[in-house]
Image (cartoon, rainbow, N blue to C red):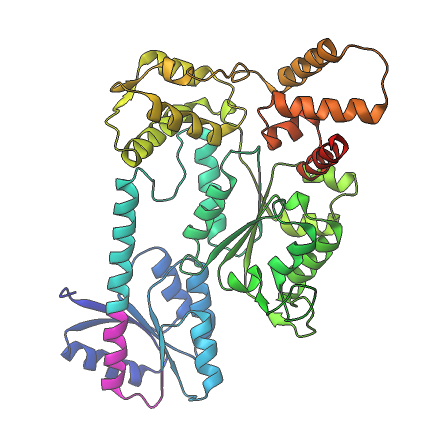
Amino acid sequence: MNSPKHILLIEDDLDLAELAVAYFRQKDIQVHHCEDPLEALQNLKSRKIAPDAIITDLNLPKMSGLDFIRQMRNEGLMVPIILVTVSNDVDTAVTAIEAGAYDFVVKPIHFPQLLISAQRAFKYNYLNRENKNLRDAIDQSKGLSPHGIIGKSESIRLIMELAKRVAKSSATVSITGESGTGKEVFAKAIHNWSGRSDKPFVAINCSAIPENLLESELFGHAKGSFTGAHDKKIGLFEEANGGTLFLDEIGDLNLALQAKLLRVLQEKEIKRVGENQSRPIDVRIITATHKDLRMEVYEKRFREDLFFRLNVIPILIPPLRERREDIMPLAEFFLKKFSELNGSKIIGFTKAAKEFLLTQHWRGNVRELENTVERAVVLSSEEEIDVSSFLMFDEPALATTDSEMVDDAQNTFVFKYGQQGAPLLEVERKYIQFVFEKCDRVKDLTARTLGIDRKTLYRKLQDGESLQH
């Protein structure tokens, strides 16, 4: 806090700028003056200058002070900004703060007041840096990487570079990949790399919420708008305002909600259920799905216009079996994480254990690898994890492919139930229940093996249970 402070002043009034430079120099504060906001923005992006605070006029050539602030935040540059304006009305103040300004002062400038605002901005900037350093240190002590993404494969490196580039924009991002590949991790990383990192990151799994409640979860509702609505509710769009809303499993959204989501993306406003009032929102949308949305569009289960709205920046995360260079870095990361959480003194894997990990198919991808390492950490009593810790539970299907799982399930079902005729619904019920048990009652894997979506599986499992009772 005692190091010399540096202000970037963006002001086209040269007389006022000269007075400001002279005043702050007397207070041992350096001032870099720039008339052109575009030039200032370029210097900040290239890190030619790194001020502790920025003072900018509202009315500037080429770009207004408000537009400069918005561009700064879009670029992920979080230096506190003080806006100088000739207006003292409340609307200007609110607009400035909503745009991302730290404070605002009114002309004619009272320099002692401006100094107080600048000193508060210095402290705010210092505390922000300290908090970030502390969070990084805590994360690293827990075995967590600062950005949450671990991997050294070429495919992950390229995806990370793409994610960092798109993070600076406000474009909608669509992340696809098999279940367990880390789609939400990438979504969080994009948010953290963006100018919205100091605002909320809100995530929802669209397949985990009943359809009749999902609209209320997303948009909120008015009191008394439906049975059970005893009070008003703020939806996730409003909770995420200014930040990022991550819609996981967007492919499971029904067509009616798809239409409403499309309207929100077009109009940038929402209506709570039971209200006519529109509420403006500023939310960056990131979606994820394990489905092929192009095929969903072809099958008329997903709106084509919504698909193109969401698929501005597509990111495909390859399965773990296609990037085996990432298996050991991930395994070692999970080993450190769970060793610390469980107070274990395990220091690594034996050579045989590493070979075992590298040869598995990992149908559940990173999530399955994480569960496998956690279980091994808990069960191992040696300093190094050996293969025996992985094989303590019988998992005969661990290294099989999805197609092998399907063939195996079909063959075993025929062997168990025979090939004699039976009513189709009865055969379907038995086969779904059989595959469900074969997949260790893992619904995602069962649905993928059967080639149906999870909602259809849930319904058929429930129907099967009702038939048995």
Q: Is residue 65 visible?
A: no
- The number of callouts visible is 0
Residue at 33% from the left image edge and 68% from the top image edge: 80
Closer-to-camera residue (83/297): 297
Residue at 68% from the left image edge and 66% from the top image edge: 273
Quadrant for residue 171, please give it.
Answer: bottom right
Residue 379 falls left or right of residue 180 = left
Note whether 77 is above or below 83 in the view shown. above
Q: Quadrant of the C terminus?
A: top right
Residue 292 falls left or right of residue 73 = right
Residue 109 lies in the magenta stretch: yes
Residue 449 falls left or right of residue 382 = right
Residue at 41% from the left image edge and 18% from the top image edge: 390
Q: Residue 89: where, in percent of width, then height? A: 45, 88
Q: Main secondary structure of the magenta part?
A: helix
- Tell me the magenta residue range: 105-122
Q: Residue 282: where, in percent of width, then height? A: 54, 64
Q: Residue 45: where, in percent of width, then height? A: 37, 57
Quadrant for residue 468, please give it.
Answer: top right
Closer-to-camera residue (316/4): 316
Note whether 283 is above or below 29 in the view shown. above
Note whether 356 is above or below 100 in the view shown. above
Residue 290 lies in the magenta stretch: no
Q: Is residue 142 visible?
A: yes
Residue sitting farthest toward the bottom: 108
Quadrant for residue 437, please give it.
Answer: top right
Closer-to-camera residue (39/8): 8
Q: Residue 178: where, in percent of width, then height? A: 57, 32
